[in-house]
């Protein structure tokens, strides 16, 4: 019996040694299925829209250390415009953008048009249209900037002359049956061919939405086969679900306001709110190109 044990034991030891050696040789051979960033800790970086009075925190995509991982996401970051400051005017031939005003007020420049913007406004900025924001309140203007790549096989229509702007406060909350009754949704922006969102204008964005979690609420962890998704915890705290955990089902991570998560396709995604207060999450999904048929 002892001889048999001596013969068996070295096998798993050799396997573990091989795995350790593989990890040393190829420490990043497998891309992570999700990314986490804590926004207050992210330093500002100079990008195409920054100026001495316009500052950008790269959360995911452009400017981030793992910018190569997202497929449809071009950029996802926080912009702060100083009092009476302004960002550079930018335009992109095949990138659609969403701006969400977090604090302050200012002016959106869209082509030859201008429009006032304020806290909780969200707006769709189509490809090819030159745009920027400026602060007009005497207080810093803070906003989320999200950009998504439009595949070359998608036809881009002429953009609207005037910017599409709405306010989160004016969007009606609703329960989505498949996510349970403990979270209420505001469906803000989605595909130009759709009808369920407040604004239907996008080529790649599936849904920009707001989730209001009741104490102890959850949206039931799930996954999306052909979507990337970002969560930004606006307030409250709980447990973020990201990928598989030790139980083979869920990876649970303590989450607080300012935590941002990027999820690759098929990654388990969700949130369990704490039992002592409500929580709000701003989320966005973007569609990956469908695989081409081999036949």
Image (spheres, grey):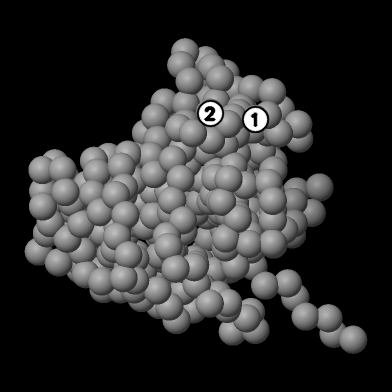
Left or right: residue 224 versus residue 189 is right
Q: Is residue 60 placed above or below 171 in the rendered structure?
A: below
Residue at the image point whose x is 29% and y is 60% from the top? 114
Left or right: residue 244 versus residue 84 is right
For the question of whether residue 95 can be seen, the reply is: no
- Mark 1 neighbour class, 10 Å CA radius: few under 14, some 14 to 19, many 20 or more: some
Q: Nearer the viewer, residue 19 or 11?
A: 19
Measured as percent of width and height from the top left, residue 50 is found at 20, 66
For the question of whether residue 109 can be seen, the reply is: yes
Q: Nearer the viewer, residue 171 or 174?
A: 171
Quickly name the residue at label 1: 174
Residue at the image point whose x is 83% and y is 81% from the top? 293
Residue at the image point whose x is 76% and y is 31% from the top? 177
Left or right: residue 115 versus residue 240 is left
Quickly name the residue at label 2: 212
Measured as percent of width and height from the top left, residue 238 is found at 48, 27
Q: Tag 2 or tag 1, which sits nearer the N-term?
A: 1
Measured as percent of width and height from the top left, residue 37 is found at 37, 49
- Quarter of the rendering occupied by the C terminus: bottom right
Name the image quarter holding residue 6: bottom right
The residue mark sitting in front, 1 or 2, is 1
Residue furthest out toward the top: 276
Residue at the image point whose x is 26% and y is 59% from the top? 133
Name the image quarter holding residue 266: bottom right
Q: For numbered disc 2, what is the local secondary structure?
A: strand
Report, in whole angstroms, how far the alpha carbon at label 1 lies from the one at label 2: 10 Å
Q: For numbered disc 1, what is the local secondary structure?
A: loop
């Amino acid at each position: 019996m002892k001889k048999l044990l001596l013969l068996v034991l070295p096998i798993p030891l050799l396997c573990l040694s091989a795995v350790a050696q593989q990890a040393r040789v190829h420490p990043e051979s497998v891309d992570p299925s999700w990314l986490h960033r804590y926004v207050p800790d992210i330093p500002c970086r100079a990008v195409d829209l920054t100026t001495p009075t316009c500052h950008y925190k790269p959360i995911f995509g452009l400017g981030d250390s793992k910018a190569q991982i997202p497929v449809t996401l071009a950029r996802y970051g926080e912009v702060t415009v100083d009092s009476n400051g302004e960002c550079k005017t930018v335009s992109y031939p095949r990138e659609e953008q969403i701006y969400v005003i977090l604090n302050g007020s200012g002016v959106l420049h869209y082509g030859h048009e201008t429009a006032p913007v304020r806290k909780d406004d969200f707006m769709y900025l189509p490809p090819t249209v030159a745009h920027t924001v400026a602060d007009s309140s005497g207080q810093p203007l803070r906003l989320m900037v999200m950009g998504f790549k439009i595949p070359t096989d998608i036809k881009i229509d002429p953009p609207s002359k005037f910017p599409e702007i709405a306010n989160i406060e004016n969007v009606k909350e609703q329960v989505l049956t498949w996510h349970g009754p403990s979270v209420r949704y505001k469906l803000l922006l989605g595909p130009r061919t759709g009808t369920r969102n407040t604004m239907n204008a996008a080529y790649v964005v599936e849904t920009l939405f707001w989730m209001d979690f009741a104490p102890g609420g959850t949206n039931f962890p799930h996954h999306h086969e052909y979507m990337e998704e970002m969560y930004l915890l606006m307030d409250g705290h709980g447990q973020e679900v990201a990928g598989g955990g030790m139980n083979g089902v869920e990876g649970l991570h303590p989450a607080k306001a300012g935590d941002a998560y990027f999820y690759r396709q098929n990654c388990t995604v969700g949130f369990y709110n704490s039992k002592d207060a409500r929580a709000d999450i701003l989320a966005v999904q973007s569609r990956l190109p469908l695989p081409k048929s081999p036949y």
